Image (cartoon, rainbow, N blue to C red):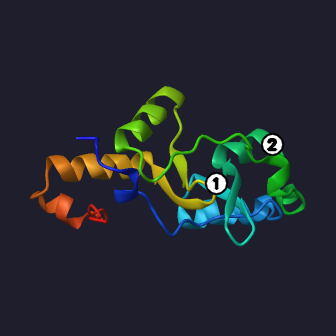
Amino acid sequence: MMNERISSIMTINVVTVTPEHTLKDVRELLFDRHFHHLPVVEGPGKKLVGIITSWDLLKTQASVDDYSRIKVGDVMTRKVVTLRPNELVGAAALIFLRHLFHGIPIVNDENELVGLVTTHDVLKYLYYKEYPNDEFAQSLEFKPRMD
């Protein structure tokens, strides 16, 4: 069941930030868009250089008033677990279970961001596969891509 490619369930149009953005920018994106993590990219090819999460904001122990003075590059996680689009959904599930991550950037061979897969994506995928005719499954945003 988890032998399909990650490319079939990943989010393609990923919201990102750069190392020059501030924690104020990140906080607004996280709260306004209900995200928990944002890939950090540089350059026109969107080379992945890190990730910043809601947990990273808490770890800084900085006041929200100070967020506009703190750059993403100063607090982001630089060592990021990534997967390639052709890897299997099961590989993402294993990483989520072993490391308690909730989002994995998907990169190409040049380490450019091409997508993001989350625990929520895997849950939607599994639910849809198990109950394809269920009314709720039909309402899910996820529909397997056939590319």
Front residue (pair 124, 9)? 9
Q: Say which of 33 and 109 sits in front.
A: 109
Q: Residue furthest front?
A: 109
Can see residue 63?
A: no
Q: Quadrant of residue 59?
A: top right
Q: Residue 4, how many percent across, how many down?
A: 29, 48
* Residue at the outermost top position: 98
Q: Secondary structure at mark 2?
A: helix
| Quadrant placement of the C terminus | bottom left
**67 is higher (above) or lower (below) than 75:** below
Q: Answer yes or no: do the residues labelled 2 and 1 have beta carbons within 8 Å?
A: no
Q: Is residue 87 above or below residue 18?
A: above
Give the labeled residue for mark 2: 60
| Amino acid type shown at disc 1 | Asn
Q: Which mark is residue 111?
A: 1
Label 2 sits on what residue type?
A: Thr
Which quadrant of the view contains residue 143? bottom left
Residue 98 percent across, percent down from the top left: 49, 27
Report the side of 40 relative to 140 (left or right).
right
The crowding category of the residue bearing disc 2, from other C-alpha atoms within 10 Å (few below 14, some 14 to 19, many at least 20), is: few
Residue for point 55% across, 57% down: 35
Q: Earlier in the sequence, mark 2 or mark 1?
A: 2
Q: Which mark is residue 7?
A: none
Q: In percent of the image, x 29 and y 64: which residue is there?
A: 145
In the depicted structure, whether residue 3 falls above or below residue 46: above
Q: Position of residue 11 (x, y in %)?
A: 45, 62
